[in-house]
Amino acid sequence: MVNVGEVFRVVVNSIARSKVSLIGALISTVIFPFLFVAAALDMQGIIKNPYFGFLTYMVMGPLFGLGLLLLLLGIIFFKGTEDIGIYTYEYLKEQFTKPGRVSRVRRLIILITLIINITIIVVLVFSYSAFHYTESVAFCGQFCHRVMNPEYVTFQNSPHSRVSCVECHIGEDAEWFTRSKFSGVKQLFAVAFDTYSKPIKTPIGGLRPRRQTCEECHRPEMFHGAKLYVKDKFLPDEENTHLQTAMLIKVGSGGYRGQEAHGIHWHVSPENKIVYRYTDRERQNIVEVKLIKADGTEVVYAKTESEAGNSRDSGNPDSQQGGESEMDCMDCHNRPTHIYLSPDEALDLKLFTGEIPRELPFIKREALAAITKKYATAEKARNGINIQLLGWYREHYPEITEKQSSLLAKAVRGVQMAYVENVFPEMNVEWGTYKDFIGHDDNGGCFRCHDGSHRSESGEFISTTCESCHTILAKEQPASEVLNICAMEE
Ligand code: HEC
Ligand code: HEC
Ligand code: HEC
Ligand code: HEC
Ligand code: HEC
């Protein structure tokens, strides 16, 4: 039998004898009530500030833990011989044995037991909430505001703004969860010491298997047929002429229960496996595509030597990291939520929604000139855009400046938004920093493979006919006529 009294004596005396332990005990005792109240406030949702969460779970919590750790370390490694404190075993024993004192000590013991119990509860509750805090969008997007601002802003303006960061970046899987928490600690250090890269590089390593991530919510097997796509565009002329492009995008399906895989999602059907080889980190230059069919036969489409050398290089010296990868959702949907528009698209969207009034002559042209200038910070951009637009209208349309100043002010706000939602000078995110693989802007995206330069041994090319991907119903036609044109196509 272990002598409980003896163990207790050793423990209490060790704490009393070790400076390290005493410091630990002091830290824990001081932090404890604050942590308790803060955790309670947070759990009740009374204070929702991201910095409050950070203070509670990333500062006070670890400090409390550190206190307990010091206490333990002191007992084990830094035992002193002299008593520093007053609560030695001998002292306590005296309190117990002397008649009259017992009741006081008993009260003390009840108190200590109570404190220990509460501590255990706090530790449990705390670790649970700390876990949830690090999972929250506030932690990912707002606390590391400066670093994550581009991702957070674009995320909020995307169809996935109600999906939390961790649902895509971490998932439920235990293995990926631990991995991400470790890399998260590394990232916190990178932020603290300002060693992270600006802009943050993509593709990001260490994402968990990508299909698993998206397919938790989407099932391309269940898609079918085509989707009507209408794109609005405004010309840089005096009327800001509104044009529309309409087409049927052959979204297709991955095939399911007798329905054959077809169209665009044919790439992700279970019977097709596509492996490609690339020569740059951004995967812009794809030199070989291997299609492995269900029966095991393979077709290899390779770029000819001269074309492979003539690479669509990103011009980035540290991007020479080639590799091989199996094609999945993110080889097309690499920007499902961090969607950065081009200057044209950003303005067209604001003109379409009316945030930039279309009745202002030449607003598209002048706005484009203002937002494509280089600015050192978002604040300078806001000022620059304001000065430039007001100046131009004062010079060319003084009557608008005088009579329609509120319309002009609204336009300036809309143009500023088009800039700050897509360009983040503080993180070196300029127009076009992050490329979208959907479509074929600048011959990227689908045309990294479907460009007529990848040839199989038997002389076939990966298809380039426009019709295999979409049927164009109307290309840049006056907006009022597009519906009529579509109706006639039927
Ligand atoms: C719908 C899924 C999804 C959600 C939700 C999501 N992300 Fe992403 N994130 C991605 C994908 C996909 C990439 C691009 C990965 C690649 O290209 O390798 C990415 C890339 C990033 C990058 C690298 C830089 C970049 O823009 O490519 C950062 C940083 C990032 N996400 C942070 C966040 C933060 C913070 C949140 C929450 C505010 C968030 N993400 C929410 C899917 C998501
Ligand atoms: C937690 C669920 C969830 C996850 C995970 C998720 N999505 Fe979504 N996604 C949605 C919802 C919900 C919508 C519909 C939003 C809407 O229509 O407003 C959507 C919409 C989309 C759309 C259509 C967007 C549009 O413009 O209409 C695409 C494409 C898409 N997701 C791709 C992806 C990809 C790729 C991934 C993996 C990186 C992914 N999603 C992960 C829930 C999810
Ligand atoms: C070969 C490229 C490619 C691959 C691979 C791909 N998609 Fe798509 N996907 C597209 C295109 C193109 C569209 C239609 C255009 C758009 O929505 O912008 C689309 C549309 C979608 C939509 C919207 C469907 C609708 O009807 O609105 C969802 C959701 C989606 N994809 C999810 C996925 C998921 C999940 C995967 C991986 C299992 C995947 N896609 C793989 C190219 C691809
Ligand atoms: C990594 C290379 C690669 C990329 C990127 C790629 N594809 Fe493909 N795609 C192929 C290969 C290989 C085939 C099979 C050969 C063929 O049919 O031409 C194919 C076939 C297709 C087909 C015909 C499917 C069928 O029914 O037979 C469509 C449609 C298609 N791709 C659309 C797209 C679209 C849209 C994108 C961009 C969003 C895209 N692809 C991006 C490699 C790629
Ligand atoms: C491999 C598939 C593929 C091929 C081949 C292809 N496209 Fe596309 N194209 C797309 C996809 C996907 C989009 C839609 C992008 C999006 O969702 O934003 C698109 C978008 C477009 C748009 C609209 C651009 C805009 O304003 O947003 C036009 C115009 C277009 N394609 C023309 C063509 C023409 C002309 C050809 C033939 C020379 C062609 N495409 C071949 C996949 C393809």
Image (cartoon, rainbow, N blue to C red):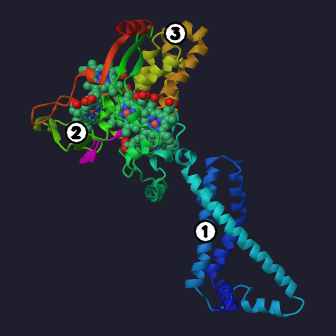
Q: Which mark is residue 286?
A: 2
| Amino acid type, callout 3 | Glu
**Looking at the image, is mark 3 or mark 2 earlier in the sequence?**
2
Q: Is mark 2 within 8 Å of ligand 4?
A: yes
Determine the residue positioned at 64% across, 61% down. 126
| Amino acid type, callout 2 | Ile
Q: CA distance from mark 2 to mark 1?
A: 50 Å
Q: Tell me if residue 61 is in the magenta stretch.
A: no
Residue 2 position in % (x across, y down): 64, 91
Pair 3/1: label in front: 1
Q: Tell me if residue 322 is in the magenta stretch.
A: yes
Q: CA distance from mark 3 to mark 2?
A: 45 Å
**Looking at the image, is mark 3 or mark 1 earlier in the sequence?**
1
Q: CA distance from mark 3 to mark 1?
A: 62 Å
Asked whether disc 2 touches disc 1, contact meaning CB atoms under 8 Å apart, the reply is no
Q: How many marks?
A: 3
In the image, is 56 to the left or to the right of 445? right
> Does 65 appear above or below 207?
below
Residue for badge 3: 359
Q: Which mark is residue 65?
A: 1
